[in-house]
Structures are given as C-alpha cells and as structure tokens.
C-alpha cells in the first residue's frame, strides 16, 4: 500500500509499505477514504515531539471502509463506512469507564498520561496512522462509528478530532451565559473552539492569531472579534482593556508548543528544546484571564517541562483544565449538532489532495500558503 513515511523534521514522502493485518481478535482493517493533516501533525513534522521515529505513518484523523474484522468484533462488519476517533481506547479500563477515552490505560505502554493515538510519536503508543491506503484499528468494537447515511464523509472525517477537540476546549472552559471567551489560535481547532463557545452560551468571542487569512476566516465562520497579536504590545493589558479591566472569563489555548509570538521562547522551546515548545500562548492565557477565570488547554506540548507562571495561577484563583478530547464520549451530541446545522465541519476544508501529493500538502499547510485552513487527503481516490 501507499502510506506517509516520516524521514525526519520537515521531510515527508509517500512510500510503499506492507498492508496491515489483523493482530488481535478486536482489530479491524480499514480502507481509508479520507485522512486529514492536523496541526498536531505539524508538531511531529517540525520535530517538536520526542520519540517520533523515522518511518512512522502519520495521520490520526481518518475515516474509511471496513475491509476485515477480528473474531471478537461484534459492532462492525465488512463494508461499513466508519469514522475513527483519534483516541485508541479499550473501553474497559478504569479511565475509559469514566469516559476519559483519551487517557485509556491499556492502549499505550507509556500511559502514565495520554492513551494511544493513531499516527503519533511512540510516547502515544507508536501506532501507524491513517495517512495511508489501509490502517489497522485496534479495539475496533469501541471507537469506530458507522457514518450516518445522511452525513457527508467530509463532515465525518472532521468529527474524528477537530470538531470534538474544539468542542471539548469550550466545554472545559465551563462557559456561563454571557461570558467573554478568548481563543488563542485561529487554526482549525481554535476556529472550532470559538464556534462551539456560542453553543455553551458565550456572550462575546475573541480570536487571537497573526495570520490574516485565518483571522478573516474566523471572523466570518465563528463569528468572532479577531485581533492580530503582532500589533499588540502587551497581551494581558490589551485583553483587560477589552473587558472593563477585568480580563476574560475563559481563555482557550488552541496553539500549544508550535506557537509564534516570542523570539526568546522560540529559541528556548523550538530550537534548543529546553522547554517543551514555545509556551508564550500559555502565558498569554494565564495572564489574560480574570481572577477566578478558567484556562482551557488543548494545544499540544511535548511531555517535558515548561516555564509556566504558576504564581499567577495561584494568586488569581484560576482553574486550569486540559486534556486530549475524548471523542467517543462527545460523538452523539456532535452528530446532532451537525444534523441540526449548528456546526458545519466541512466548511473548514480548503484543500483536497490525493495521497500521492502528501509532501506538498505538508509544506503548504506548515508554511500557511494558499490560504490553507484544513487539508484533507484522499487515499484510494476517496472511495
């Protein structure tokens, strides 16, 4: 089969690899019809996540047709078109039983924190991902969901990560009616978090980024007030001036360690790797939140230390909530939101690319060229 092949930082190719096979009675083999490139993939692509090994097949956002199932899989059959959550979850461990599918204790040998994730570093289990023609799906009786007949597969593939991650970012914010919500980052997850903030009762939504075409997209899609941080001298002061001197009720970090906005932190976190990426957005979120406010973190940081202003967290009485989205828990309500037209996932897709052109798609997305918001790959010609 053809599949993504990571060759080192900023080096991707498409290579011929062995077809996956059933390895466990709860496995399924899925023929991929759509697979996204995610902002989290760019953390890997740029060399910011430890133990990302040469030869890895990336891709944690995909849907496809079930080709084969193991003997213990009762919920799927060959021919089903399914969306596959990016979490690999057993459904039976202590954390899965709490709905914390992103923290499954069985799917990742390194599971002191995150559970297994498709197509990510070996810190998340080392599973091959869906930027390929075929993929092995462990615990196939738990995660995958047949795509409803009425749903466009372009919508379905975004329900594997982008939509639930943005939704959970807003959910973790504990948004109350009328709250002011500031979202840092106008990538697909930040845009979706801003869109979903309205579903929880936000009275005002503000998006911060530095790429003008992304800000323009957020202005219309979310909709939101948008500001370019390159024109802002002091983020906390700026946000307080917008909020009667108080600060935001909820700040959402939808960027993580691949942030721009601080030359010093870029050197420390992205060049020297002293920090787990550039943590400037985390500083902005903590310092821009009002006393007693909430900081919600879905941006990805590497599993090492960051210099975080914990004194400000304590003295302001902030609540910090963070996690990988538990997609399976959220899918029922998100499917309803899509059906009722409250969320339009496929509107985020700006580029539809054959799998064979994957290296160009990574370059385009990473360099923010051609007004790219969300690229989707089409293995097997999308069929």
Image (cartoon, rainbow, N blue to C red):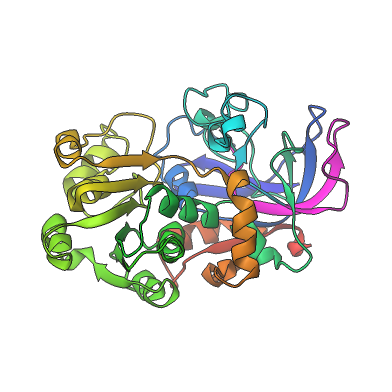
The outermost residue toward the front is 177
Whether residue 126 is visible, yes or no, is no
Residue 346, position in %: x, y?
59, 69
Query: Is residue 121 inside the magenta stretch?
Result: no
Q: Is residue 150 visible?
A: yes
Q: Position of residue 19 (x, y in %)?
A: 78, 40
Q: Is residue 143 above or below residue 178?
A: above
Give the camera-side residue of 239 and 35: 239
> Total marks drawn?
0
Q: Quick one: 319 or 239, which is closer to the camera?
A: 319
Q: Quadrant of residue 63?
A: bottom right
Residue 333's image quarter? bottom right
Q: Against 173, is 368 above or below?
A: below
Magenta stretch bounds: 56-82
Q: Is residue 78 magenta?
A: yes
Q: Tell whether 304 sits left or right of 353.
A: left
Q: Position of residue 151 (x, y in %)?
A: 71, 66
Against 187, is 172 above or below?
Answer: above
Q: Is residue 44 above or below residue 289?
A: above
Q: Magenta stretch: dominant SS? A: loop
> In the drawing, does residue 149 fall left or right of residue 313?
right
Q: Measured from the top left, where is residue 15 in percent x and y?
A: 66, 46
Which quadrant of the figure contains the C terminus?
A: bottom right
Query: Which residue is drawn at the image coordinates 76% and 61% (left, top)?
Result: 148
What residue is shown at x 62% (from left), y 28% (from top)? 107
> Seen in the image, is 131 located left or right of residue 207?
right
């Amino acid at each position: 089969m053809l599949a993504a092949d990571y060759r080192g930082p900023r080096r991707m190719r498409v290579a011929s690899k062995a077809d996956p096979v059933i390895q466990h009675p709860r496995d399924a083999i899925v023929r991929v019809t759509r697979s996204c490139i995610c902002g989290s993939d760019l953390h890997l692509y740029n060399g910011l996540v430890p133990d990302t090994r040469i030869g890895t097949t990336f891709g944690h956002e995909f849907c496809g047709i079930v080709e084969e199932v193991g003997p213990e899989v009762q919920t799927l059959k060959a021919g089903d078109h399914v969306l596959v959550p990016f979490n690999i979850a057993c459904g039976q461990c202590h954390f899965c039983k709490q709905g914390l599918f992103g923290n499954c204790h069985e799917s990742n040998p390194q599971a002191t924190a995150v559970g297994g994730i498709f197509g990510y570093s070996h810190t998340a289990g080392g599973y091959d991902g869906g930027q390929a023609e075929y993929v092995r799906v462990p615990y196939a009786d738990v995660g995958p969901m047949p795509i409803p007949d009425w749903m466009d597969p372009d919508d379905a593939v975004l329900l594997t990560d982008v939509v639930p991650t943005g939704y959970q970012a807003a959910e973790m914010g504990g948004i109350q009616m009328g709250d002011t919500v500031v979202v840092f980052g106008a990538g697909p997850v930040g845009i979706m978090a801003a869109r979903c903030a309205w579903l929880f009762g936000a009275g005002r939504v503000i998006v911060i980024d530095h790429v003008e075409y992304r800000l323009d997209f957020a202005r219309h899609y979310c909709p939101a007030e948008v500001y370019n941080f390159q024109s802002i001298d002091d983020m906390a002061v700026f946000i307080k001036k917008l909020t009667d001197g108080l600060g935001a009720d909820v700040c959402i970090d939808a960027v993580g360690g691949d942030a721009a906005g601080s030359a010093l932190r870029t050197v420390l976190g992205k060049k020297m790797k002293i920090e787990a990426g550039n943590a400037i957005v985390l500083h902005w979120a903590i310092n821009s939140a009002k006393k007693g406010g909430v900081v919600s973190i879905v941006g990805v940081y590497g599993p090492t230390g960051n210099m975080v202003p914990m004194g400000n967290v304590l003295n302001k009485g902030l609540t910090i909530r963070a996690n990988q989205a538990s997609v399976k828990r959220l899918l029922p309500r998100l499917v309803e939101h899509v059906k009722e037209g409250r969320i339009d996932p496929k509107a985020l897709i700006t580029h539809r690319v054959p799998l064979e052109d994957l290296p160009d798609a990574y370059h385009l997305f990473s360099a923010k060229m051609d007004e790219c918001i969300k690229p989707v790959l089409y293995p097997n010609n999308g069929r």
